[in-house]
Image (tube, rainbow, N blue to C red):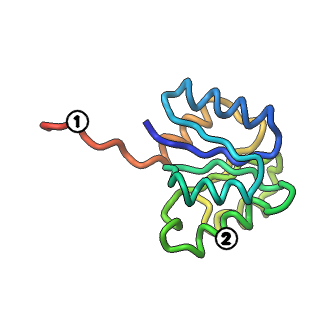
């Protein structure tokens, strides 16, 4: 079971993502903006961050820059979740260190694939 932080300013999207992640067997935590998301990252050290790009206050790009600037946090994978499907935004996100990009509205299969690809592998069972 992974801990996944959802940073999203739209409550309905945030709640839906949390519900889906819990149904997939993960612990999900939420932040409504970039600043509170950064605080939760430092406090809880999630296994993965799903982050919107366009938010009031700190944007997703600023959250990513803060993660990349902190040696203790830069290893935490961040995937952007955004309604913008512009290739320039995707390229910029990857260039800055994002691990991936999900376009809203996303489908369950795409989310599952992103989780499979970007969550750390579970340790093998004891005794194997």
User: Residue furthest toward the top?
Assistant: 23
Helix, strand or loop under label 1? loop
User: Residue at the spot x=58%, y=37% of the render?
Assistant: 28
- Pick whichever, 2 or 37, lies toward us: 37
Q: CA distance from mark 2 to mark 1?
A: 36 Å
| Outermost residue toward the left in this view | 127
Disc ID at residue 60: none
Earlier in the chain: of badge 2 and badge 1, it is: 2
Q: Is residue 55 left or right of residue 1?
A: right
Identified at 68% across, 54% down, the residue is 37
Q: Please name the residue shown 48% across and 69% down the image.
A: 72
The image shows residue 33, relative to residue 64, as above or below, that is above
Image quarter of the C terminus: top left
Give the camera-side residue of 8 and 45. Answer: 45
From the image, tell me which residue sits under label 2: 65
Give the image quarter of residue 104.
Answer: top right
| Disc 1 target residue | 125
Q: Image check: 31 left or right of 111?
A: right
Residue density around tag 2, few if under 14, some if 14–19, many if 20 or more, within 10 Å = some
Is disc 2 placed on a helix, strand or loop? Answer: helix
Image position, residue 45 (x, y; %)? 50, 54
| Other-residue count near label 1 (Cα within 10 Å), few / some / many at <14 / 14–19 / ≥20 | few
Q: Position of residue 3 (x, y in %)?
A: 50, 42
Q: Position of residue 115 (x, y in %)?
A: 53, 41
93 displayed left or right of 72: right
For residue 126, above or below residue 75:
above
Residue 24 location, x and y as percent?
Answer: 52, 27
Residue at far right of view:
56
Left or right of 45? Residue 30 is right
| In the rendered image, the vertical position of residue 24 relative to residue 35, given as above or below | above
Residue at horizontal 55%, vertical 34%?
112
């Amino acid at each position: 079971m992974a801990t996944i932080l959802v940073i999203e300013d739209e409550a309905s999207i945030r709640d839906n993502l949390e519900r889906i992640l819990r149904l997939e067997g993960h612990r999900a935590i939420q932040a409504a903006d970039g600043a509170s998301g950064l605080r939760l990252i430092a406090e809880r050290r999630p296994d993965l961050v799903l982050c919107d790009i366009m938010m009031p206050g700190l944007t997703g790009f600023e959250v990513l820059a803060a993660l990349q600037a902190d040696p203790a946090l830069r290893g935490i994978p961040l995937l952007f979740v955004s309604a913008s499907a512009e290739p320039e935004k995707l390229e910029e996100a990857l260039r800055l260190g994002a691990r991936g990009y999900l376009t809203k509205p996303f489908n369950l299969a795409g989310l599952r694939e992103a989780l499979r690809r970007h969550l750390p592998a579970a340790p093998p069972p004891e005794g194997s």
